[in-house]
Image: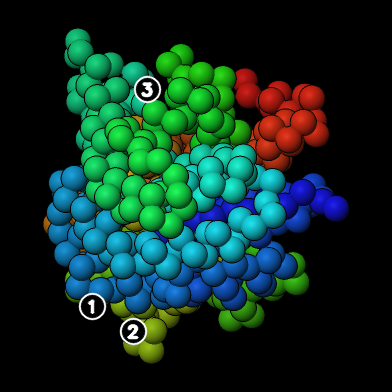
């Protein structure tokens, strides 16, 4: 019987999608795979032929549109942001513990994302299941970069110390939020001893627990600070489902002119979607570019748009992005990764969380313009940014070159080989390609 791999992931679609890509990779390698996540993702998971397990009865998009989530977008303080995330997740925590126990039943390995590591690790410990921690953000302490949730400082003496401290502060802050809940579950539901301090990071470092970071080592190479149990296998990309075909009207639109500018902000909620739409329409008119606009739950999909703009509600970025001229987005980890792979210049307008981190990276790599401020966004600023990204030949060259590098990586395959090594199935599993 094939070993069971249980992957547990909660969060926005961008936080869940890489784990669905991992699930597909493990299936192709012959494993029995379960993906445990929120109930609203069941159609998304099952359309790829992956076994779905419910962690919580939760509509993630509805939660993102709540007053609490909108308030979260108004703060630039990462500590306040974390408290807001915790407030949103707390009511679902005990329900998720029950879902975790069911999903992990009989599993050989549990792979946890950030919002399932608290509780998920404890259930794995109780059941004697090997645990792999996984992240798609830069959250493991290192001297080279600060935490993805904290602004950088200039290249001055002491920066390495600052970088390490930002990670430790974020780790401790998250742990202090979750500590009462985790210890209640450990003692009263799982019969385990309390954890006193620095929970996850202390466990990882003292026990050399395996960690997989789902981004490219060409962007964030493994740090000299890290043990050999921390791996950077590459991005976990999800392609379009088998049998999927693009809408005929979209294909017709793309065929009738120059490649358009993509504009979309994923699952981000808008305080004033009508004003944002006006800014987009004016900027595309001023640049003379065509546009593909991604509508989300805040957008009135029935509104009449100019003929130079095509609006859609969903489309796999793996298919869409290579057909664009410029990609305008919110800087989310998943969207940024797909834009890197497509090799297209980017305009980023970060909202919160790790989005400023990835937005800064696009600019530092020379594949994107300087990030724009969401709160002070104007049609003039967006016009200037689109015009620069669509005409700067050096930016286009760098974006294309980076895309070629990213497309050669096998992040999913490398992750599968790492887990095979943990299970003793592949003696060469720790060897995966990376040339800095």
Q: In which quarter of the image is the C terminus?
A: top right
Looking at the image, is mark 2 or mark 1 earlier in the sequence? Answer: 1
Q: Where is residue 306 in the image (x, y as percent from the top left)?
A: 37, 80
Q: Which residue is drawn at 28% across and 29% down?
A: 168
The Cα atoms of the two marked residues, 2 and 1, are separated by 9 Å
Tell me where residue 300 sits by quadrant: bottom left
Instruction: Mark 2: give few (<14), some (14-19) or many (20+) Cα within 10 Å.
Output: few
Looking at the image, is mark 3 or mark 2 earlier in the sequence? Answer: 3
Instruction: Mark 1: give few (<14), some (14-19) or many (20+) Cα within 10 Å.
Output: some
Q: Name the residue under label 2.
A: 300
Nearer the observer, 388 or 274: 274
Q: Mark 1 points at which residue?
A: 274
Nearer the observer, 126 or 26: 126
- Residue 295 lies left or right of residue 73; in this view the side is right
Nearer the observer, 176 or 348: 176
Q: Which residue is drawn at 46% across and 60% down?
A: 97
Instruction: Mark 3: give few (<14), some (14-19) or many (20+) Cα within 10 Å.
Output: many
Q: Mark 3 points at which residue?
A: 142
Residues at badges 2 and 1 in contact (C-beta under 8 Å)?
A: yes
311 w.r.t. 371: above or below: below
196 w.r.t. 271: above or below: above
Mark carried by residue 363: none
Answer whether residue 243 is visible to the viewer in this image: yes
The residue lying furthest to the right in this view is 1
3 or 1: mark nearer the eye? 3
Answer whether residue 332 is visible to the viewer in this image: no
Nearer the observer, 79 or 197: 197
Q: Residue at x 37, y 62 (%)?
A: 93
The Cα atoms of the two marked residues, 3 and 2, are separated by 43 Å
- Label 3 SS: loop
Tell me where residue 341 sits by quadrant: top right
Q: Where is residue 351 in the image (x, y as percent from the top left)?
A: 26, 55
């Amino acid at each position: 019987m094939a070993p069971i791999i249980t992957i547990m992931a909660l969060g926005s679609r961008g936080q869940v999608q890489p784990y669905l890509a991992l699930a597909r990779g493990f299936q192709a390698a012959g494993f029995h795979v379960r993906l445990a996540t929120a109930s609203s993702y069941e159609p998304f998971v099952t359309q790829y032929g992956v076994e779905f397990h419910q962690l919580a009865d939760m509509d993630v998009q509805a939660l993102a549109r709540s007053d609490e989530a909108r308030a979260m977008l108004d703060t630039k303080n990462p500590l306040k942001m974390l408290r807001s995330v915790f407030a949103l997740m707390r009511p679902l925590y005990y329900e998720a513990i029950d879902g975790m126990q069911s999903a992990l039943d009989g599993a050989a390995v549990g792979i946890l994302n950030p919002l399932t590591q608290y509780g998920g690790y404890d259930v794995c410990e109780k059941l004697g299941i090997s645990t792999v921690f996984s992240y798609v953000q830069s959250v493991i302490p290192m001297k080279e970069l600060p935490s993805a949730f904290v602004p950088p400082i200039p290249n001055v003496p002491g920066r390495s110390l600052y970088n390490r401290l930002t990670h430790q502060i974020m780790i401790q802050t998250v742990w202090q939020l979750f500590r009462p809940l985790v210890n209640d579950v450990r003692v009263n539901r799982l019969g385990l001893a309390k954890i006193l301090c620095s929970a996850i990071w202390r466990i990882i470092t003292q026990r050399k627990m395996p960690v997989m970071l789902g981004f490219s080592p060409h962007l964030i190479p493994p740090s000299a600070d890290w043990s050999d149990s921390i791996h950077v296998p590459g991005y976990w990309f999800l392609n379009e489902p088998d049998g999927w075909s693009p809408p005929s009207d979209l294909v017709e639109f793309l065929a009738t002119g120059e490649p358009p500018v993509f504009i979309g902000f994923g699952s981000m909620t808008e305080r004033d979607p009508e004003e944002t739409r006006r800014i987009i329409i004016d900027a595309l008119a001023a640049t003379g570019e065509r546009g593909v606009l991604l509508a989300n739950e805040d957008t009135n999909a029935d509104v009449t748009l100019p003929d130079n703009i095509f609006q859609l509600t969903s489309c796999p970025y793996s298919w869409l992005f290579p057909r664009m001229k410029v990609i305008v987005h919110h800087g989310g980890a998943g969207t940024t990764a797909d834009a890197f792979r497509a090799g297209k210049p980017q305009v980023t307008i970060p909202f919160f969380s790790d989005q400023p981190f990835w937005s800064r990276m696009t600019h530092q790599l020379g594949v994107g313009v300087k990030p724009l401020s969401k709160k002070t966004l104007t049609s003039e600023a967006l016009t200037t940014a689109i015009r620069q990204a669509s005409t700067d030949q050096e930016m286009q060259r760098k974006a294309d070159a980076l895309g070629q590098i990213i497309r050669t990586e096998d992040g999913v395959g490398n992750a599968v080989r790492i887990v095979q090594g943990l299970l003793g199935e592949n003696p060469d599993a720790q060897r995966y390609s990376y040339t800095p």
